Image (tube, rainbow, N blue to C red):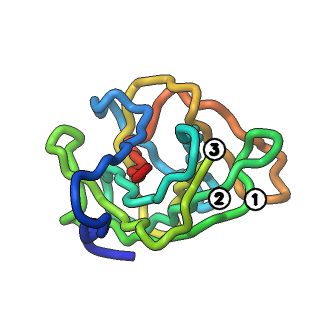
Amino acid sequence: MGGCAAPATVGPGPTRELVLGYDDARATGTLAFPSEGYESVIRFQLPDGEHRPLRLWLQAEAVGRLEITIYDNTFFETPGNAIQTLTREISAADLSNGKDGRWVVEDLAGLKPLKGTVWIGVHKTGGTPTIWASGVASGQTFVRDNDPSNPMGLLPTKHTPMIRLELAP
């Protein structure tokens, strides 16, 4: 998907939205992807009940192509089956300096409602994209190698990617 997302249609009257993120809104470094198998994953524990996904936000620092996957949760609290996979070409117009409030936004309004725990995974599929990260060690961010011949599981990270998940309760 490319371009900016249009506002979700939620109907008449006031609406409520949840914007979930684990960073502290202060970009202190970047997250790079050393290989196409290297994936950064964030665990999002949703509030009780079902929630309609609206948008996914990320702050990009360098151009390239990213694949963004929303995973369900397994019994072992790891990313499970893919719910949705999006490909995003990050262009120079999408880039942020980490302080300018510029976000790349993906429209998720067509997805089925989510509940419980979901995981957002991001990895490169072309170029050398990087994402801004904060210095917060949230306990919800991990890296892994998606190569099935590599036994590396989820490894916790000390930095949290600037990725947000927007939902409607």
Residue 41 picture location, percent across and down: 58, 46
The kind of residue tagged 3 is Thr
Quadrant of residue 76 within the rendered picture: top right
Residue 47 picture location, percent across and down: 53, 38
SS under mark 3 = strand
Asked if one can make out residue 158 in the rendered structure from this viewpoint, the answer is yes
Residue 157 picture location, percent across and down: 57, 31
Q: In the image as oriented, which residue stretches furthest toward the left?
A: 100
Asked if one can make out residue 91 in the rendered structure from this viewpoint, the answer is no
Judge depth for marks 2 and 3 and give the one in front: 3
**Residue 161, numbered label:** none
Q: Are marks 1 and 2 in contact (CB under 8 Å)?
A: yes
Counting residues from the N terminus, which is met first, the one under dot 1 or under dot 2? 2
Counting residues from the N terminus, which is met first, the one under dot 2 or under dot 3? 2
Q: Are marks 2 and 3 in contact (CB under 8 Å)?
A: no
Q: CA distance from mark 1 to mark 2?
A: 6 Å
Residue carrying label 3: 117
> Which residue occupies the foreground of this view, 82 or 155?
82
Quadrant of residue 84 within the rendered picture: bottom right
Q: CA distance from mark 3 to mark 1?
A: 23 Å
Residue carrying label 1: 147
Identify the residue shown where x is 40% and y is 46%.
163
- Vertical placement of residue 69 versus 166, above or below: below
- Vertical placement of residue 102 versus 28, above or below: below
Identify the residue shown where x is 43% and y is 66%.
108
Residue 20 picture location, percent across and down: 42, 40
Identify the residue shown where x is 32% and y is 56%.
62
Quadrant of the snapshot with the N terminus:
bottom left
**Residue 37, numbered label:** 2
